[in-house]
Amino acid sequence: MKRAFSGVQPSGVLHIGNYFGAIRRFTEFQDEYDCYYCIVDLHAITVYQDPEELPKAIRDTALYYLASGLDPEKVTMFAQSDVPCHAELSWMLECISTFGELSRMTQFKEKARGTESFSSGLFTYPVLMAADILLYDADVVPVGEDQKQHVELCRDIAERFNSRYGETFKIPEAIIPEYGARVKSLQDPNKKMSKSDPNPLSYISLSDSKDEIAAKVRRAVTDSGREIVYSPEDKPAIANLMTIYSLCTGLGFPEIEDEFAGKGYADFKKALIDAIIYALEPVQQKYAEYAESGMVSSILRQGAEKANQVSSQVLRRAKQSMGLSLLADPTRRKLF
Ligand code: ATP
Ligand code: LTN
């Protein structure tokens, strides 16, 4: 069976961009791939996380994995910091990645803009992500558009490692959805919807109540004119709202244009509110059921056990290739 790997940071409330761009799609792989879905808490601490809140956010992310339809019998879900191989391989890969290539990462440039007091971890963040993926011999990595550059870097690092030290890592491929790969902020359609946006009006969180959803959609920015037409260049705000409507209903853009021909933004927003509420309702309901069941800690414990088994074998292989750890290689043990 081919393998899929992906991760989500427990760094705040999950939003519909995370859901449509990543988590909902994770479920599409679970029948045909051996899936590893990680809660990447070591990535989250590249910026300060309140130690009281972080464990809650880890649990919450796991609950949304389950609520979105991931079956713990089929997929391995775990917290990154429960599997020490990630940090260890990350260091080894840092030693073959360059300052230049990490400096070119768009996410880093955006997050570090205007300051030099960012953590070194924020800079080496994509190398830890490469380690995550390579440790599981992943074939595919389902992610949103913003992570494409990081998966490409992962491929470069793996190819460099293989050519320097011999075939060790499988080269993974990013799988980006056609639509929903980049849901934009409701307040600024030039920016992606983001958990770390200080303005909660910019995103719809998976835990938002019906009233909050309605209020946020009503206050979402629109473009000039009044027609509902899909034109990302001329009408980026409406194109974004239409994308969300399409993700919630499964309708294509021409069908949406037909549905709202002759109607204005107010009618469209009303329908959008209903569509988002309808799409999130089952997720919110399942979230509450799983939270009540208390199953999540044992699911994460079992996931970490399996992830430790798989990743420690790949780490051993990488150490052997690099000439590290005498215990990893019986032929070298004889040297002593
Ligand atoms: P932050 O913006 O605070 O860095 P985030 O909202 O991007 O966080 P992540 O945990 O970094 O969330 O991302 C988890 C997954 O969700 C990734 O696969 C990412 O590509 C996807 N994703 C994040 N934001 C969006 C978005 N606006 N549209 C579509 N997919 C997204
Ligand atoms: N950087 C990713 C989260 C992430 C990830 C991964 C995604 C960390 N490790 C490995 C896919 C594969 C993000 O979404 N911000």
Image: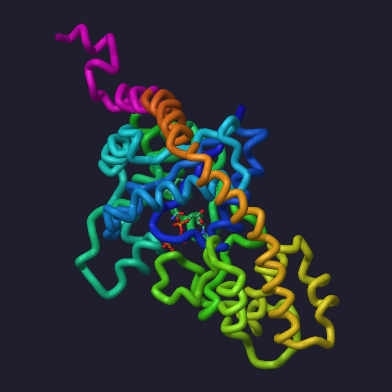
In the picture, measured across the screen, residue 205 lies left or right of residue 95, that is: right
Q: Quadrant of the C terminus?
A: top left
Residue in view at x 34 percent, y 36 percent: 82
Q: Is residue 30 visible?
A: yes
Residue in view at x 50 percent, y 77 percent: 201
Residue in view at x 45 percent, y 42 percent: 38
Magenta span has 32? no
Viewer-side residue, 166 vs 104:
104
Question: Where 332 falls versus 49 (above or below)?
Answer: above
Report the span colored magenta: 313-336
Residue in view at x 29 percent, y 15 percent: 329
Question: Where 325 falls versus 275 (above or below)?
Answer: above
Dominant secondary structure, magenta: helix
Viewer-side residue, 18 vs 288:
288
| Image position, residue 294 (x, y; %) | 48, 39
Q: Is residue 99 visible?
A: no
- Residue at the left extreme of this rendering: 336
| Image position, residue 265 (x, y; %) | 71, 86
In the picture, measured across the screen, residue 22 lies left or right of residue 299, that is: right
| Image position, residue 108 (x, y; %) | 35, 62
| Image position, residue 307 (x, y; %) | 43, 30
Q: Quadrant of the N terminus?
A: top right
- Residue at the bottom extreme of this rendering: 225
Magenta span has 332? yes
Q: How is the image coloured?
A: rainbow
Viewer-side residue, 109 vs 117:
117
